[in-house]
Amino acid sequence: MTEEQDLIDQSPPPSAPDPEPNSSTNPNSVIHPRRVSFEHGLLPIQKLVFTDPIQTLAPVKQKLADAASNNRVGSAAIADVLQISGDHARLVLETLGSVLHSESDPLVRAKPEEVDSVGADLRDLILFLYIQSYKKLLPRTHKDSAAVADVWPSTSAFDGYLSALSPIQLVRSNSRRFMPSQADDEAHQLSYLQKHLANIISLLAEPVEGEGDESLVFSMEAFEHLRFLVQFGDKGSDVSPLSQATPFFANSDPDMPAVPVPASQVHDWLLQNIASALESITERISGKENGPSNDQDDAMSDVCAAPNKVAPSTRGPCLIEGVSKTSLVKQASDLRGRSVKVVNCHDSVIYLLAPLRYATVHGCSDTTIVLGAVGKAIKVEHCERVHVIVAAKRVCIANCRECVFFLGVNQRPLIVGDNHKLQVAPYNTFYSHLEEHMREVGLEPTINKWDKPLALGAVDPHDSLSHPAGVADAQAESAASVDPDQFVNFLIPNWFSGAELGSTKDNPFPLPDAYMAAQQRNLKNFEETRRSLKEAPLEENRKRELSSALHVYFKDWLYASGNIRQLYCLQGD
């Protein structure tokens, strides 16, 4: 244990000087974990996972500080200090940039060619490296296993063994497990922060000049970097200074530097707030388990009780879950949040035509999902036979099978976990407001790295599952490119004929030459076939018979493919 940790661990209990948080009178005083850091900020790179973070990260921090310029660390220094490849160092910076709390940070605003040199703030980088030790919460058992069994494929006799079962079966296993609720996840993340808070504080605290490491203090600037991990307020105070929620930095004179406060005081105040929030969450979870509840968090667990649910949350992401055998369309005006989660949807077509910050697709099968412009990151996990069409800054694919991804992506697609028969292809659609939404979230249509996937480990060190021996170092199966001759454009119907149209008239991502040539060949073949049919030397009654036969075959295809539902949904709207 370090001297800094000793100093914090021996500090007075949190009952002491600071006023007790009173969440009942002011909901904005409730502390929450910043969930995107835990959901989109973890990388399955074994060298980044420190089993004893404080003992390992303290010397790492010093080495990074020695290599830093203006307290920022570039990719070359990260690769050298952490002993990882240049590609992985770049990935660290890109991942950190996608989950940073400050939109004004130079890493967030850097152009792709500037990322390596701009680097990361040392304090943000240390927090990012620290949470690589986080273990995700195991999926929980669904409360109505029999009902779920009627919807989802049956599990394998080999459940529990890597690669012996499908991704969906792996998630549910024999006990029918499902994605944890928001309350469960928050409680798990807060418990992690509670356990590790002393270490985190000691890594960010600074010694008083002339007094050595025995006396640690927190400046207001250093304190603000804790926004990477926590936030206050029911709607997520991503833009409010974290210091304004404290009794020791609030109302500081903006023209005068705030006086640093003892690290022990920061530790005690945060610990007290975390304990209060955990108590509140525990009561909420206990209340839901003991009786009916209208709490928004139920949306993540109630797949069969309320199918086709769309649940915009005031603080968390908009939840779309349990959609089955139908089409669902949502526009920017429908998505009250700036992030979305599509969970446990089956045999459907889902259109989310909006500018988004983050997106998660979890546990879906036999479904086509079209997302608008995702400015930060999208994660697709535990899916089978799903087609995902998305324009995004970054894409992570984990534990999926027989899925196809049509991508307009500014960074290399990340592939992790136990994947099988994945395919990637260039972006293949558009809607009238697409370019407007891309500009809004900062996507660049001239950069598309769809064909440069980066495969990491087949086993995620952040999950809490046990895995067979010998697979820890295995690499994830990468994705193959869709054959250009099999590539087709995807047409988004005009669902809202009376709505104002945008300016996008075509796919904003240029197609590679091979795909453009294949499209032109297919179009030429189609025109020749149509002309041959039209000019066929047949009598009128034979032409009518031919036309009727083509309509029958087309109708059969509509029913066999399930696309007939889209026509019915379009007529219904």
Image (cartoon, rainbow, N blue to C red):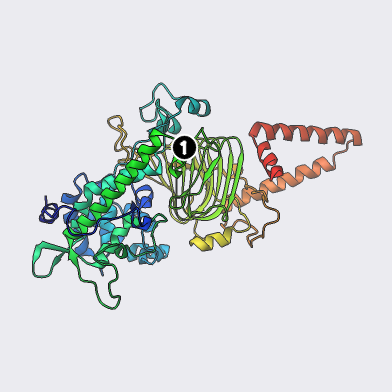
The residue under the point 82% across, 34% down is 548
Q: Is residue 223 above or below residue 527?
A: below
Camera-side residue of 85 and 318: 318
Q: Report which quarter residue 103 is drawn in.
A: bottom left
Q: Is residue 161 above or below residue 259?
A: above
Can the viewer see residue 44 in this picture?
Answer: no
| Amino acid residing under circle 1 | Gly
Q: Residue 547 at x, y = what percent?
A: 82, 36
**Label 1 secondary element:** loop
Residue extending furthest toward the top: 157
Q: Residue 477 at x, y = what percent?
A: 41, 38
Can the viewer see residue 104 in this picture?
Answer: yes
Camera-side residue of 78 and 463: 463
Residue extending furthest toward the bottom: 255
Q: Report which quarter residue 74 is drawn in.
A: bottom left
Report the residue marked by disc 1. 363
User: Left or right: 10 with respect to 86?
Assistant: left
Q: Residue 353 at x, y = what percent?
A: 57, 52
